[in-house]
């Protein structure tokens, strides 16, 4: 047997980078449209009139969304990870559920509740404008921060926190100065997702009267027919996402040294009772009420007075199928991209970053990119097929489930990459080297060392994409096959026609379908932690 | 699984309701040269539609029952539809493209998505000329009127006979209207541009913005609610949103409708502002004959009745009969005679005016 030198690390760089590039392709198509598309005077008109307002609203909405989401998500993650109180086990997964509520549906429900003729009208200010939109995004998207931060807190060694306490910090001070900085990369990753999804939203901001850049973009397209200018505005969103990634990465880099501690002591949960427990329960219940229960109740109340949406079970099946398959694919792609990032090779990292950018762009733009791409691809296929078989390629790419799944990967890659990357960060180079020293090859290292450490991250990635796909609208609407309804499409069709009652049942089903996998993964993650604790 | 029995019970309920609607609308009167019922060779027709109303299901079902032609549907927003049909080019499976706004039809036509259908000429005799594309590329099969909902206790209908009235000083802080992102607002302003020119239209839009009671928010129904709640005195809305509230099962909705009246205001003295749900024969229609049969069916007595009775739209075909007390109370619109094609031509200009006057 020839002497082989085992590679230092398991780094499937090129397949990973290729996967990332495929995810990025639709966005690249839109970028091409932005660069090569025809120029009209519309851009100049826009700059002179609405663009400043769009940018201002975008800034305001995202700052409020991110600020509130951090304030809700991070402390609650800490509470759930480090304290014991009645209901903790339930809140652990319940807190993730508002993610199942599409932001536009929450916006419709809250506006309906608080507007002049609504049941809360006059008691609370109407949820509207950029502030209202920011709040809606915060209460529906904070679970990104919560989920990622909870994992970070739960996985943190208790040493830093205990050391801070020994040095005289109060529990609050120790949280702020020791635990929080260690979880900063996870929180930053969660916030990046919150901001990007707020940037990409169209339905909620239109309804609440908070026209952001994505509204300007759709308006350029819908009102003016200036597709190329819409693509250019999309590039602004992409640029913002790029900056976000850079910021997030710098957080990660700063946290690297501190995370590399040797022995890891699992944290013990502090028991709360009496007033403390009551406060903890109230704090956990509040965001779930605001982001999920109250909007659902409003929609449900309206549903009671409306006929049931048609084909609900078919829609549910289609949604489940699309979301399930996409979740699985995304888990794999997310992991691949995370490996590409881990390799630190410039081009691979660039490809993975590129893949994540689609998250900040409205789904209709991603759909536009996929359509353009498929148009070209179909042309090539048809030509090649004709040359060989004398007839055009037998299948039409758009209107196939494949097209949809591709579009979802492009749109939601960031949601898949972030958790995978967070998880992979735990696999320090030292581990690889130790594994090599012990004689394991790269494949064995990946299986026996990486897999146990990253499986929960990959699961989380798959779950996030699962839920995203359940909620996804524009790409689904336009790329789906004939007679193929999904829950989100059904809900949106009714809601956009101002029939909240009929929209309620499918919206409710989205949340219900998201529930079992959420519970399952929450339990699975906790079990995983328990196992690590025992082995230490 | 946690959702086992109840939804299936509901599903059968839905199915029952659908059958009922079908029975109500699918009177076995065969129209024109439709293929014989039950013909398994009848094939299919592929619709790309921006509509998603309950009346449509009834119409599709009745069509299939009558002709044996299967109806395949993709529903999406108008702009996305156009983009998909365009991207697929010659390979597009689209037979018929349907939108709920004349501006979108215009854009689809500009993109070369339609072909003329001379076979439809006789059927189109029943449709007013201004609802049909000048070269017969598409036609309106149902109409909606953008008018004014008002609080009768604070507004005398004689004050709002014309949209141009609303731009005056005495309406300061009294108007509710949704965002200018909405295509119905764009078409309204486009029609005004056609009637009075861009300058006058801009002055009008400026006046409306000055007179707003609150920043635009919500949909048309929400504007009606705001009038009922006293936040504003008038709201610019489509007629069927008010009609739907009047016919709603929810008593709270009927209370809202009770508190407002609706008037089909003139547009600069030319008649009511009418927009269409329109359809056209797709350029590459693979099932051309079936598509023509379907387009003809849209104008049939039962389809026209379904639009009027189930979605409160006005039938486009002259003499179509229906029973809808709310529509009868509003009366037949005396429409602005301008060809709705102009709404598309002026849509871009309308949008720029909205941007300039700061109508959010």
Image (tube, coloured by chain):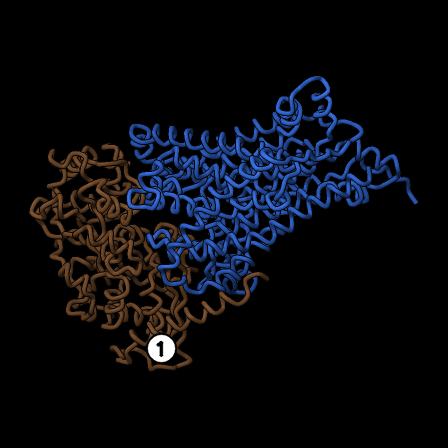
Q: Is residue A380 visible?
A: no
Q: Report the front residue among B20 and A76.
A: A76
**Residue B133 percent coordinates (x, y):** 21, 58
Q: Residue at x 34, y 41 (%)?
A: A219
Horizontally, residue A268 falls left or right of residue B264, namely: right
From this viewpoint, which residue is outermost toward the top?
A167
Horizontally, residue A357 falls left or right of residue B227, namely: right
Q: Residue at x 17, y 68 (%)?
A: B126
Q: Which residue is mark 1?
A: B65
Q: Report the front residue among B127 and B207.
A: B207
Q: Few, some or many C-alpha atoms within 10 Å of disc 1 (few <14, some 14-19, many ≥20)?
A: some
Horizontally, residue B268 falls left or right of residue B122, namely: left
Q: Quadrant of residue B317?
A: bottom left
**Residue B333 percent coordinates (x, y):** 14, 58
Q: Residue at x 27, y 59 (%)?
A: B278
From this viewpoint, which residue is outermost toward the front?
A274
**Residue A76 percent coordinates (x, y):** 58, 35
Q: Colour of chain A?
A: blue
**Residue B245 percent coordinates (x, y):** 26, 56
Q: Chain of mark 1?
A: B
Q: Is residue A98 visible?
A: yes
Number of callouts: 1
Letter of the chain in brown: B
Determine whether B55 is above or below B144 in the image.
Answer: below
Query: In which quadrant will I find the C terminus of chain B?
Result: top left
Q: Secondary structure at mark 1?
A: helix
Q: Report the front residue among A507 and A203.
A: A507
Query: In which quadrant will I find the N terminus of chain B?
Result: bottom right
Horizontally, residue A260 falls left or right of residue A468, namely: right
């Amino acid at each position: 047997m020839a002497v082989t030198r085992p590679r230092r690390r398991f780094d499937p760089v090129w397949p990973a980078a290729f996967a990332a590039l495929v995810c990025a392709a639709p966005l690249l198509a839109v970028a091409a449209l932005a660069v090569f598309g025809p120029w009209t005077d519309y851009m100049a008109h826009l700059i002179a009139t609405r663009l400043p307002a769009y940018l201002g609203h975008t800034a305001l909405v995202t700052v409020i969304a991110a600020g509130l989401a951090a304030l809700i998500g991070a402390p609650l993650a800490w509470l759930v990870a480090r304290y014991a109180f009645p209901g903790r086990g339930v809140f652990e997964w319940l807190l993730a559920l508002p993610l199942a509520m599409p932001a536009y549906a929450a916006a419709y429900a809250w506006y309906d509740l608080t507007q002049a003729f609504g049941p809360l009208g006059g008691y609370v200010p109407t949820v509207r404008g950029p502030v209202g939109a920011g709040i809606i995004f915060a209460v529906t998207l904070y679970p990104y921060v919560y989920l990622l931060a909870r994992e970070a807190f739960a996985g943190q060694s208790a040493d830093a926190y205990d050391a801070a306490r020994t040095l005289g910090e109060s529990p609050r001070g120790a949280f702020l100065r020791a635990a929080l900085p260690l979880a900063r990369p996870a929180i930053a990753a969660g916030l990046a997702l919150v901001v990007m999804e707020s940037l990409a939203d169209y339905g909620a901001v239109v309804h609440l009267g908070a026209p952001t850049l994505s509204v300007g973009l759709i308006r350029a397209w819908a009102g003016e027919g200036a597709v190329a200018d819409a693509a250019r505005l999309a590039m602004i969103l992409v640029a913002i996402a790029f900056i976000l990634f850079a910021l997030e990465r710098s957080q990660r880099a700063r946290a690297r040294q501190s995370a590399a501690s040797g022995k890891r002591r699992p944290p013990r949960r502090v028991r709360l009772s009496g007033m403390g427990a009551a406060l903890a329960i109230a704090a956990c219940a509040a965001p779930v009420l605001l982001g999920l229960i109250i909007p659902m109740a409003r929609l449900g109340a309206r549903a009671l007075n409306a006929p049931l949406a048609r084909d609900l079970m078919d829609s549910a099946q289609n949604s489940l199928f699309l979301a399930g398959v996409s979740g699985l694919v995304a888990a794999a792609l997310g992991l691949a991209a995370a490996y590409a990032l881990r390799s630190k090779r410039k081009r691979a990292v660039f490809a993975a970053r590129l893949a994540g950018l689609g998250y900040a762009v409205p789904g209709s733009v991603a759909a536009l990119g996929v359509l353009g791409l498929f148009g070209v691809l179909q042309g090539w296929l048809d030509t090649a097929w004709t040359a060989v078989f004398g007839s055009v390629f037998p299948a039409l790419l758009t209107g196939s489930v494949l097209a949809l799944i591709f579009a979802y990967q492009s749109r939601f890659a960031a949601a898949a990459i972030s958790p995978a990357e967070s998880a992979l960060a735990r696999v320090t180079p030292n581990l690889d080297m130790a594994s090599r020293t012990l004689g394991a090859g790269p494949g064995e290292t990946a299986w026996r060392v990486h897999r146990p450490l990253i499986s929960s991250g990959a699961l989380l990635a798959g779950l996030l994409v699962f839920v995203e796909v359940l909620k996804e609208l524009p790409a689904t609407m336009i790329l789906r096959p004939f007679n193929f309804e999904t829950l989100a499409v059904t809900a949106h069709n009714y809601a956009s026609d101002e029939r909240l009652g009929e929209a309620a049942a499918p919206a409710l089903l989205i949340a219900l379908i998201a529930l079992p996998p959420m519970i399952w993964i929450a339990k699975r993650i906790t079990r995983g932690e328990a196992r690590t604790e025992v082995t230490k | 699984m946690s959702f086992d029995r109840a939804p299936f019970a509901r599903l059968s309920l839905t199915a029952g309701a659908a059958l009922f609607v079908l029975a109500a609308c699918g009177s076995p009167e065969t129209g024109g040269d439709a293929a014989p019922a039950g013909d398994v060779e009848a094939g299919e027709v592929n619709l790309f539609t921006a509509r998603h109303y309950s009346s449509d299901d009834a119409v599709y079902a009745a069509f299939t029952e009558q002709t044996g032609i299967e109806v395949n549907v993709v529903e999406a927003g108008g702009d996305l539809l156009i983009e998909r049909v365009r991207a697929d080019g010659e390979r597009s499976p689209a037979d018929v493209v349907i939108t709920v706004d004349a501006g979108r039809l215009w854009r689809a036509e500009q993109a070369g998505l339609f072909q003329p259908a001379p076979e439809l000429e006789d059927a189109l005799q029943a449709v007013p000329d201004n609802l049909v594309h000048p070269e017969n590329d598409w036609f309106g099969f149902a109409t909606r009127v953008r008018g004014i909902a008002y609080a009768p206790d604070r507004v005398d209908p004689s004050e709002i006979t014309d949209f141009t009235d609303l731009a005056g000083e005495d309406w300061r802080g009294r108007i509710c209207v949704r965002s200018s992102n909405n295509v119905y607002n764009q078409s309204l302003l486009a029609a005004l541009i056609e009637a009075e020119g861009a300058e006058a239209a801009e002055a009008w839009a400026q006046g409306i913005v000055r007179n707003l009671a609150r920043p635009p928010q919500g949909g048309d129904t929400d504007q009606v609610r705001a009038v009922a709640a006293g936040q504003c005195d008038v709201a610019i809305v489509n007629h069927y949103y008010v009609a739907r509230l009047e016919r709603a099962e929810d008593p709270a909705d009927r209370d809202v409708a009770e508190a407002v009246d609706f008037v089909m205001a003139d547009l600069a003295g030319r008649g009511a502002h009418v927009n269409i749900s329109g359809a056209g024969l797709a350029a590459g229609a693979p099932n051309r004959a079936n598509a023509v049969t379907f387009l003809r069916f849209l104008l049939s007595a039962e389809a026209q009745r379904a639009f009027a009775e189930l979605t409160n739209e006005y039938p486009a075909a002259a003499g179509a009969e229906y029973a809808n007390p709310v529509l009868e109370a509003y009366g037949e619109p005396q429409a602005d005679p301008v060809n709705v094609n102009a709404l598309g031509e002026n849509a871009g200009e309308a949008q720029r005016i909205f941007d300039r006057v700061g109508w959010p």
